[in-house]
């Protein structure tokens, strides 16, 4: 039998926090396994299946024997598909040397951060933030510096960025549409933010994981359309996971200046080598093939959003801003934090225990007093979940 000793975890890993979103997912799995009728409003993934034409492309890749290593940057077919997609949809022109495929959008962000920052550098992260942003910064031995955005209802502005910059600032991370708030930065404001970045000799990452999930009257917009002088300081991190319901395929991509891409490729060469060959063929088909599936998913998300926001505004103690994108609502629940329930974590636990409903604590996103509710689930389950939440909120308000 092995002798039990305390494992000497590396300092940078020990400082990292576990993912609150994955913890919520695990809790829902455990409850289902116990036979509990759980309403899971925690998932950060679509409830749709991967479209058939994308799955068929993977089948064809298997039959053709495309089961070997690929170049670290990705197959020529996938790189060409990414370049063509951005030209068709946004009129943006890139060379294949400015593009790389990754094992999910998360790896694109990881590669970009660790290839740029040094110990002691500061990385600006607007609140609320996707839970992984600060943890990658900590892993890279840099310092996360958070930008408060509640005064603008969680919509980042150029003035907020300017005020947060210090002599140690190296990088800004932007996420629009936002996970968890669903807020979308208007193109003109995004451009002003990047002008501040350039003015102070900084760099930025634009996480465009929810690129196509923007609700009318607004339309999808990418930072890829910025002037070349601004793009020289920007890495765009993209993913197939949300837009095409391909979370399990683990394919993402990065678009950045070729020198930055070169540094990111070094990181990837010594970590995952390349994304799965079969998944790359499927991802190429996702960008090259029919986009009707995207429009259908967006229309359904909009239908759910419209119902959910109206319903949440009737829940005692809840305040909610209508999200312009993604598939999350991010209500302010401080009106429910009274008596034995003092924090949003305690509220989420109460919802699990009493209502068998899983939501995600906003504190994990840097926003204590808020919760994230995913509407990447059926309208019927949303309605049941909100009815359960309302019953708990009414008790707290009473």
Image: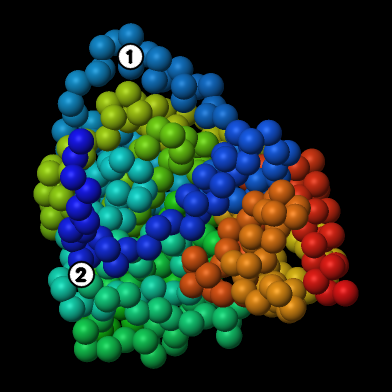
Quadrant (top left/top right/bottom left/bottom right) for the C terminus: bottom right
- Residue in the picture at 26% in, 12% down: 65
Position of 325 relative to 33 (above/below): below
Residue on which the image places disc 1: 62
Residue underneath mark 2: 141
In this rendering, the answer to whether 343 lies above or below 92 is below
Q: Is residue 357 left or right of residue 65?
A: right
Are there few (<14), some (14-19), or many (20+) residues within 10 Å of tag 1? Answer: some
Regarding residue 288, the answer to whether it shows in the image is no
From the top left corner, tell me how far across and down residue 68 is, in percent.
Answer: 19, 21
Q: For numbered disc 2, what is the local secondary structure? A: loop
**Image position, residue 183 (x, y; %):** 57, 66
The correct choice, above or below, for 263 with respect to 291 in the image is below
Instruction: Find numbered disc 1 in the image and state the secondary structure of the residue it sits on.
Output: helix
Residue 30: quadrant of the picture: top right
Disc 1 to disc 2: CB gap under 8 Å: no
């Amino acid at each position: 039998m092995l002798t039990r000793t305390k494992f000497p975890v590396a300092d940078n890993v020990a400082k990292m926090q576990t993912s609150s979103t994955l913890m919520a997912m695990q809790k829902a799995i455990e409850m289902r396994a116990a036979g509990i009728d759980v309403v899971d409003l925690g998932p950060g993934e679509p409830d749709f299946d991967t479209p058939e034409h994308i799955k068929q492309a993977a089948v064809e890749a298997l039959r053709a024997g495309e089961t070997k290593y690929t170049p670290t940057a990705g197959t020529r077919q996938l790189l060409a598909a990414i370049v063509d997609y951005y030209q068709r949809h946004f009129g943006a022109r890139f060379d294949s040397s400015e593009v790389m495929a990754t094992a999910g959008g998360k790896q694109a962000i990881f590669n970009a951060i660790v290839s740029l920052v040094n110990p002691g550098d500061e990385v600006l992260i607007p609140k609320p933030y996707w839970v992984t942003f600060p943890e990658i910064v900590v892993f890279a031995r840099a310092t996360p510096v958070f930008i408060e955005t509640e005064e603008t209802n969680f919509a980042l502005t150029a003035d907020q960025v300017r005020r947060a910059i210090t002599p140690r600032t190296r990088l800004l991370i932007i996420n629009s549409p936002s996970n968890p708030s669903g807020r979308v930065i208007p193109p003109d404001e995004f451009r002003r933010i990047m002008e501040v970045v350039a003015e102070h000799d900084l760099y930025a990452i634009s996480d465009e994981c929810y690129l196509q999930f923007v609700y009318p009257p607004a339309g999808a917009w990418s930072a890829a359309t910025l002037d070349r002088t601004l793009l020289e300081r920007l890495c765009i991190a993209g993913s197939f996971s949300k837009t095409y319901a391909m979370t399990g395929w683990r394919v993402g991509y990065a678009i950045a200046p070729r020198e930055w891409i070169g540094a990111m490729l070094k990181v990837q060469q010594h970590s995952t080598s390349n994304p799965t060959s079969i998944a790359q063929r499927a991802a190429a088909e996702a960008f090259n093939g029919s986009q009707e599936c995207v429009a259908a998913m967006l229309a359904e998300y909009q239908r759910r959003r419209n119902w959910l926001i109206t319903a949440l505004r009737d829940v005692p103690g809840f305040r909610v801003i209508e999200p312009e994108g993604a598939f999350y609502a991010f209500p302010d629940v401080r009106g429910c934090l009274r008596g034995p329930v003092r924090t949003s974590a305690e509220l989420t636990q109460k919802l699990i225990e009493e209502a068998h409903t899983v939501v995600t604590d906003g504190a994990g996103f840097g926003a204590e007093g808020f919760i994230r509710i995913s509407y990447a689930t059926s309208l019927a389950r949303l309605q049941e979940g909100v009815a359960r939440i309302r019953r708990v909120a009414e008790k707290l308000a009473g």
